[in-house]
Structures are given as C-alpha cells and as structure tokens.
Image: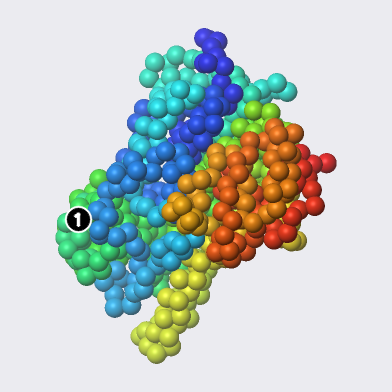
Amino acid sequence: MTVETLSSPQVIIVGGGPVGLGLAIDLGQRGVRCVLIEKYESPQQVPKGQNLTQRTLEHFHFWGAEPALRAARTIPREYGIGGMTAYGTLLSDYRYDWLQRELVRPFYFMDNERLPQYATEAVLRQRVSELPSVETLYGWSAESVAQDDGGVEVSLRGRGSGETRRLRAAYAVGCDGSRSLVRDVCGITQTKSDHDRLMVLLVFRSEQLHKLLERYPNKSFYNVLHPDLKGYWRFFGRVDLGTTWFFHAPVPMGTTKDNFDFRALLREAVGADFDVEFEHVGFWELRVATADRYRSGRVFVAGDAAHSHPPYGGYGINTGLEDAVNLGWKLTAVLQGWAGPKLLDTYDEERRPVFVSTARDFIEKAIESDRDFLAGYDPAIDKAAFESEWQARASGARSEVHSFEPNYEGSSIMTGANGRAPSAIGGHEFTARAGHHLAPYRMISGRDVYDELGADFTLIDLGATPETVVEFQSAADALRVPLKVVTEKTEAAQKHYGANLILVRPDQFVAFDAKDAPTDAHQVLRRAIGNTG
C-alpha cells in the first residue's frame, strides 16, 4: 500500500455529490485544507435534486457560484419553475399551484432556482477546482475509516487503476449517500420508517407531453393524486423545456425493467396518449431514514448519509447543503483555534432535529394528509364536498411554504432558548430572532445587508451605544473570534429587524438580538462559539 498524505489535509470529505462539494467549498474558502474523495469521474446524468430554495441560493452566493448556477439552468428563466397538484390525472379539471416558494421570496436574499442535480454538481466541481486549499480525487472510493485520539485515517482505492492510498486528517465527513460506508464503519445506527413501497424512476423524452402541458404555463413539476395510491404520488418533472422528463410513481413489488408496461403507467397518469422514448428506468424503496447521531468522535455524516427520504417537496438536496454550511463554519472555528471542540457537538444538536421535523411534519404528514383526503372525498360521490375541500387544500399548500422555516431555537449556542428546540416548523418574519435565519434589508447605501456580512461573525449595529459595540469588539479580540461590525443606525432598520443590535453567525443565522444592551458581551460571544461550562 502507498502511504501518502496529500498536503497535510485537515479534513477528509468522503463523497463528492452536492453536499460534499458544498462542504469542500465552504471549508476551502475559509482556508481549511481538505481532500475530497468521489468515486465517479463525472456527475451521473440522473435528474434528481432539482428544486433549490432561496436559502440554498444564498449558499451559492457566498460560495461565489451563484451566477454560474443561474447560467446552467436548463429551463429558460422566462418560462417559470412553479409546481402544480392535480387530481386523478395530469389533465384533470382539478388542480392548484403547489410548492410556491416565491411566496417567501421577500425573506431571503436570493431567488430560488431549478436545474438537474448533475448540472448543479458541475457548477460546484468548477468552483472547487478554483480553490488551492481543496484537492479532489475523482474516481476513488473509500474502503475503510479508522480514528484515534489524534485524527482519522481513510484508506481508498482508485476504481480504474486499483491503486491504493491512505490519508490522515484531523476530521472526516461522510457525504457518501444513503448507503454510507462512513456511517456504517463508524457504528452510527439509523432509525427507519419503511413505507413498503417500491417506486420507479423513469427518465424519458416526449415532445408531445410538452404540447399537452402547454395549457399550464410556467409549471415545471407536477404532482398527481390518485385515489388508488393511498397518498403516494405520481410525480412528473421537466429536465429541460420541451423534450426530457422524469417521473416517480409506486409500482408493484417485484417490478423490473422487463415485466411492466411503463408506457401505460405514464399515459394513465397523464390522462392522454403521447409519445415516449425511455432513457433510464430505475427503482428505489420509499422510506425515511435518520442517523441516530451525526457525529462519532472525529467523524461526521451529512446529506443522505445522515438522512434520506422520498423526493417529495424538494427537501433533500437543500437540507444536505444546510448541513454542509452548519458544519463548515464549526469545523473551521475549531481548526483555527477560536472555538473549542464542544462546538462540534452542536452540529448534531441543531441539524438532526431539523431533519426529523422535516420528515415528520412535512414529508410524511403530506402523505398522511393526501391519504385521508383521497379516502374521504370523491367528486363522483359528492362533488360539492370534494370541491370545497380541494379549495381548502389549495390554501393549505400556500401555508405549508410559509411554515417551513428551519430554525435553531433552543440550541445551546443561542442566546434566549425560550424553552423551544430546533425544528423545521417556524414562520417567516423580518424581525431578527435568535435561532432564525436573518432576513435581508436594503440599506441607505443601496446595498443589502447581505452584501455587508462578514465571512465569520457579524455584529449589526442598528442603534446600540458606542460603548456596547466596543464591548463586543473587545470581547471578540479576547476570544480571537473574527468579528465584522456593520453599522446602519436608522429608525427604518430598527423597525425592520425589531432590534438595535444583532449578532449574526457565519451561516447567516441570528445568534443574539437585543433592543437593549446585553449585560455581558463576552458571555454572548462565548455562548455563540460553544465555550460555556
């Protein structure tokens, strides 16, 4: 075996999908040396992970990759990227707008986006290649992971060459998918909720389907509810405009590529005949799985290695990228010496409950709600009752977008726990609230406050006393916490945020907010970096 350490890496990232790439960028831009191991030489051309939220586009902005991502879009911007739910068939008279993320646009700095995961990965790979602190090993697979008190060792093998290497670093992160080797070899167990459903993924070409769906302008993904499916979806999505599509749906157990009429399934779901040319037929089992812990000593898991679920609502890739951002700044703080190792425990504390809530309160709740609706209402039996409930569901779809607001209320590194716990359920507000994402604000300079945020901690002074600001700066110097001060002392800004002083974390979540001066700035900062107790 060749024993080799590449540039003395501080972090080894196993898995170079979007989450691993995002983590590598987040660390690399902060000067953390890391090695990224990915078994595939190039992104796999399967159009999953398409819906990117406004929050995810904020990450791309800070990673210096947002313009490139917009340019990689496969559907023209003027067409729109909205969603729709239909009853019975795609061409049904019953339909409503679904997953309208534009409703919460004012609370984020960026617009949302939609493009195939392989296009997103290509953009991230290009950005990674520009960072000298990140080394990539494409075409390599990890074979074992071992750790001791001083670090982590990963053994890997070239998939084509058979060459072996052994790398050592202070920490390792498994971003290697739902069948994670890193998770398994580190003894991290999972809690699973199995729905006993076999699902098919079809990728196909059809210009006629595009013609049929021109009646629904500005829609790019379509959810079909059918009474026979007990709440499980038939789901269409555009890969590009006019030609290529993907489709998810339940199929009988034992279905293979060769023993099922997939053309008939598609035509039944649409409600009309149309041409079909298949490019890919694959299968997956519908289940929700959550790692029982996101950390094992010096090893962490993120993305699908930490949590997996059906691709309902576009939560997966966005949740994984938020993992990367949460863990990235915390690893940096510990490696650069301005936070203690206890800060790393808060990665699990904050991120795992958010996914548990996402799965329970949004994904599985949607399945249960659809099942109950389909069992209780039928237009052929009571049209008036069905239409009344259908209209109510349309309003509920709008409410769901507003209520999905992942937050870290109650985290041990937030000031003001309020007796709550991190969750995916929240509410979008402009008011600055500890544990919640900072809303944007257009400053008197014409720039947004997001343009002024520092790479690490930022103190936004909206009207605090000079002594208070100096106290924070002195505390930051004493604790060696990188702190940027942004000043916007206007009545409008104070009214917008409901505070005169806001401490913002490197991941743009509010760590502390106040209308009055805090009693101890040193204590506030110590809490924010986990240096308490």
Whether residue 447 is visible to the viewer of this picture, yes or no, is: yes
Which residue has dot 1 on it? 242
Badge 1: how crowded within 10 Å, few (<14), some, or many (20+)?
A: some
Q: Which image quarter: residue 313?
A: bottom left
Q: Nearer the viewer, residue 28 or 165?
A: 28
Q: By what rule are the colours in the image chosen?
A: rainbow
Residue drawn 26% across and 52% down? 75
Q: Which image quarter: residue 188?
A: top right
Residue 336 coordinates in the image, percent (x, y):
64, 28
Residue 149 coordinates in the image, percent (x, y):
73, 23
Q: Nearer the viewer, residue 37 or 401?
A: 401
Left or right of residue 315: residue 337: right
Label tally: 1
User: What amino acid is at disc 1?
Assistant: Gly
Residue drawn 43% across and 16% down? 162
Residue 481 coordinates in the image, percent (x, y):
67, 36
Whether residue 199 is visible to the viewer of this picture, yes or no, is: no
Residue drawn 77% across and 43% down? 522
Left or right of residue 19: residue 487: right
185 to 492, vertically: above or below: above
Residue 405 coordinates in the image, percent (x, y):
55, 60
Q: Nearer the viewer, residue 276 or 472?
A: 472
Q: Nearer the viewer, residue 329 or 175?
A: 329
Name the quarter where the C terminus is drawn: top right
